[in-house]
Amino acid sequence: MSIARFWRETPRRYNLGGSKCTICGTVYFPPRAVCPTCPHHRETLEKMVPFQLVGDGEVVSYTVVHDAAEGFEMQVPYVMALVKTVEGPVLTGQIVDVEIPEVVIGLKVRATLRKLREEGKAGVIHYGYKFTPALDSDVRPPARGPAVPAESGALPASDRAPA
Ligand SMILES: [Zn+2]
């Protein structure tokens, strides 16, 4: 991919710019030109507006990657997760700054801009979003009942035998 093309396509990627249907309120990322949720798609063509996702969400599914794609070998093992954002869209992203066993379904995370990879000797650096665990102070109070403790009896990282 050329640098020019990369930067043309970049802003909506790391800014998490999606679109929102002003008829039914559904948010999409990547942005969509029409709303597939509304019964009459064509009527939504002029009703979609740009919408910025805040990047907060929680892990709804994850997998530990041991066989990395080319260019990501140095990062294995790492966690790829499906993150359901507070606005609704589910994003795929790497979870970073966390011990792998600490990644659980329901883990609160926040999107952050990170270096994805470096290309060749010219050192073209590609950026994109990854997710980091959200700080306790960032987590909104639960809407109902006490929060489910994230602890699952796992030992602290320092007590685990090396993999
Ligand atoms: Zn709609």
Image (cartoon, rainbow, N blue to C red):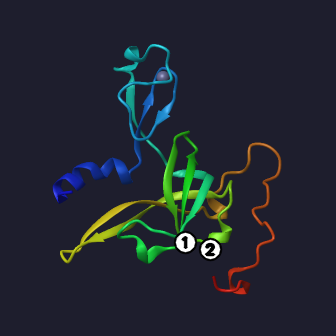
Disc 1 crowd rating (10 Å Cα; few below 14, some 14-19, many 20+) is: few
Q: Residue furthest front?
A: 67
Which three-letter amino acid code belongs to the residue tagged 1? Asp
Query: Residue 102's spot in the image, x, y percent?
Result: 67, 68
Location of residue 159 (image quadrant): bottom right
- Alpha-carbon span between mark 1 and mark 2: 7 Å
- Horizontal and vertical percent position of residue 149: 79, 60
Of discs 1 and 2, which sits in the foreground? 2
In terms of depth relative to the viewer, which is nearer, 124 or 64?
A: 64
**Residue 46's x, y, as percent?**
34, 20
Identify residue for label 1: 97
Q: In the shown orientation, is residue 39 left or right of residue 109?
A: left
152 vs 16: above or below: below
At x 72%, y 51%, the residue is 141
Which residue is identified by label 2?
Answer: 99
On screen, 48 above or below 143? above
Task: Kindly identify the residue that appears in the image at 47 percent across and 45 percent down.
Answer: 53
Pick the quarter of the image with the C terminus: bottom right
> Which residue is at 40% across, 19% downward?
44
Tally of marks = 2
- The answer to which image quadrant residue 1 occupies is bottom left
Q: Amino acid at mark 2?
A: Glu
Circle 1: element type: loop
Secondary element type, mark 2 = loop
